[in-house]
């Protein structure tokens, strides 16, 4: 009887090791997804910071264009259009998130909205 008990213990341990191996694989997959997302967000953040730095330098000029009220489209609009062309959303629904090579109706409506 003792041999049978030892065999059952070894079988139980083998099953537990298999479950642990499965859990380890799941954790490894989840960690890989998190690292990929972190890399994508870091790249996006870097790109957006560059855009912000470029637009901060021209902020005074944009304010002057708005104050004139001459009906011309300002530099802020141009910056938003450029961001859209570079693959980012400019609409209030998904602002700043990358577009998946598809046009966004909300962004297009915003770009084509008549100036009031």
Image (spheres, rainbow, N blue to C red):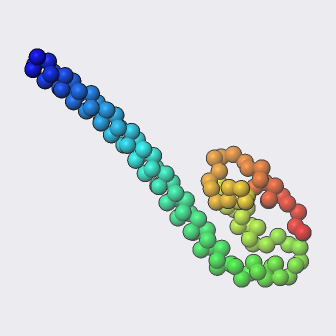
Toward which corner of the image does residue 68 lie, by quadrant? bottom right
Q: Report the number of discs.
A: 0
> x, y percentage for residue 38?
47, 55
Nearest the viewer among 67 and 26 is: 26
Q: Tell me if I can see residue 88 in this picture.
A: yes
Q: Is residue 85 visible?
A: no
Residue 13, position as x, y percentages in the image: 21, 30
Residue for point 33% across, 40% down: 24
Residue 64 in the image: above or below residue 28: below
Q: Residue at x 55, y 59 (%)?
A: 44
Which quarter of the rendering shows the N terminus?
Answer: top left
Horizontal arrangement in the rendering, residue 70 relative to residue 38 (left or right): right
The part of the image, by quadrant, that contains residue 95 is bottom right
Look at 90% across and 69% down and name the residue there. 116
Could you tell whether 95 is left or right of 3 in the image? right
Q: Nearer the viewer, residue 81 or 106?
A: 106
Figure check: 69 above or below 16:
below
Residue sitting at the far left: 2
> Residue at the front extreme?
1
> Would you say 7 lies left or right of 17 here?
left
**Residue 70 locus on image (x, y percent):** 89, 77
In this picture, is 68 found above or below 112?
Answer: below
């Amino acid at each position: 009887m003792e041999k049978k008990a030892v065999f059952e213990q070894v079988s139980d341990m083998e099953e537990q090791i298999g479950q642990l191996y499965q859990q380890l694989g799941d954790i490894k997959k989840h960690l890989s997804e998190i690292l990929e997302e972190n890399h994508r967000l870091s790249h996006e953040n870097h790109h957006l910071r560059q855009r912000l730095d470029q637009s901060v330098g021209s902020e005074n000029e944009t304010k002057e264009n708005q104050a004139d009220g001459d009906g011309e489209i300002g530099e802020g609009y141009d910056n938003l259009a450029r961001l859209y062309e570079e693959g980012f959303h400019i609409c209030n629904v998904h602002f700043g998130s990358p577009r998946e090579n598809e046009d966004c109706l909300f962004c297009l409506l915003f770009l084509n909205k008549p100036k009031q």
